[in-house]
Amino acid sequence: MTRPTAAFFDLDKTIIAKSSTLAFSREFQAGGLISRRAMLRSAYAQFVFFTGGADHDQMDKMRLFMSQLCAGWDVATVREIVHDTLDNIVEPLVYEEAVRLMEEHRAEGRDIVIVSASGAEVVEPIGQMLGADRVIATRMEIVEGKYTGNIDYYAYAEEKARAIEHLSATIGYDLDECYAYSDSVTDVHMLEVVGHPFVVNPDRELRRTAVAREWPVLSFVRPVALRSRVPLPPARPTLAALAVGGAMAAGGVMWANRRRRPT
């Protein structure tokens, strides 16, 4: 009997052209969640994230800033803002090349799984919009309907690989026949656990790793409004998202110490 397979996609700068969390900064300000100063700082974090021009300490400070920023936020308000503004904020940022890849994998019978360090309140609606089957995302501690600023589960670096392995053991995926896509060297571990790793718009370190390991390098350059394409099919009924809740941390913006496995 043939085992099921999946295509695992990082989200930020792999499926969409920006940080999924930071893209909502203006809407969070309009909703009364953050100040103008915090919004401007988030915009700067978005710039640094996009250019990849910050070192580990700067990225760590930005992640800490974003996670602590949400302390006291009402969870229902965050979900409402994301739901009401998703089409206007995220839909035009989706790479056409990523959408086409998902369509091709789906046609081959593979599940589509989004794996992101961003919070589930942001990642899950994007996954639904794209017709993803499952989502692995960060979750933030919630007490009495509000975020505390603490992280319960951080889907980042090695943890992405562990989550994929755990999900694969649960579903029965044949990882040797699975695919994975990411832009960041922090996702080397995620790429290593599948038989078909691809790097997308890679940062400098990941490009060097891809060349050394002969991993294919893809260039996604065309953000496109999904409504201009043939509508994606709805996700099939599956397990609930692996990580629910959500972090307002900037997904994928903190460098980690590299741990390369032998080629």
Image: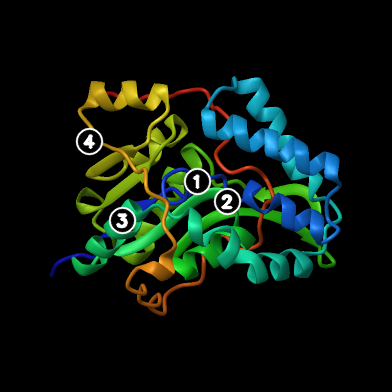
- Mark 3, secondary structure of its residue: strand
**How far, Cα to Cα, is label 3 from label 4?**
15 Å
Find residue 216 and name its label: 4
**Amino acid on which disc 1 is placed:** Asp
**In terms of depth relative to the viewer, which is nearer, 262 or 115?**
115
Callout 1 touching callout 3 (CB < 8 Å): no
Distance (Cα) linking label 4 and label 2: 25 Å
Structural distance between the alpha carbons of marks 4 and 1? 19 Å
Q: CA distance from mark 1 to mark 3?
A: 16 Å
**Upstream in the sequence, badge 2 or badge 1?**
1
Asked if the residue at tag 1 contacts the one at tag 2, i.e. Cβ–Cβ closer than 8 Å, the answer is: yes
Describe residue 148's horizontal placement relative to residue 198 as left or right.
right
Q: Earlier in the sequence, mark 2 or mark 3?
A: 3
Residue drawn where x is 27% and y is 41% of the image: 197
Please tell me whether mark 3 or mark 4 is closer to you in this view.
Answer: 4
Residue shown at 59% from the left, 49% from the top: 118
Which residue is label 3 attached to? 7
Instruction: Write down the quadrant of residue 234 in the picture.
Output: bottom left
Residue plotted at (25% across, 53% down): 178
Question: Circle 2 is placed at which residue position?
Answer: 20
Report crowding for label 2: few under 14, some 14 to 19, many 20 or more residues within 10 A (C-alpha).
many
Amino acid residing under circle 2: Ser
| Alpha carbon distance from label 2 to label 1 | 6 Å
Q: Residues within 10 Å of mark 1 (few under 14, many from 20)?
A: many
Tell me the residue that label 1 is attached to.
12
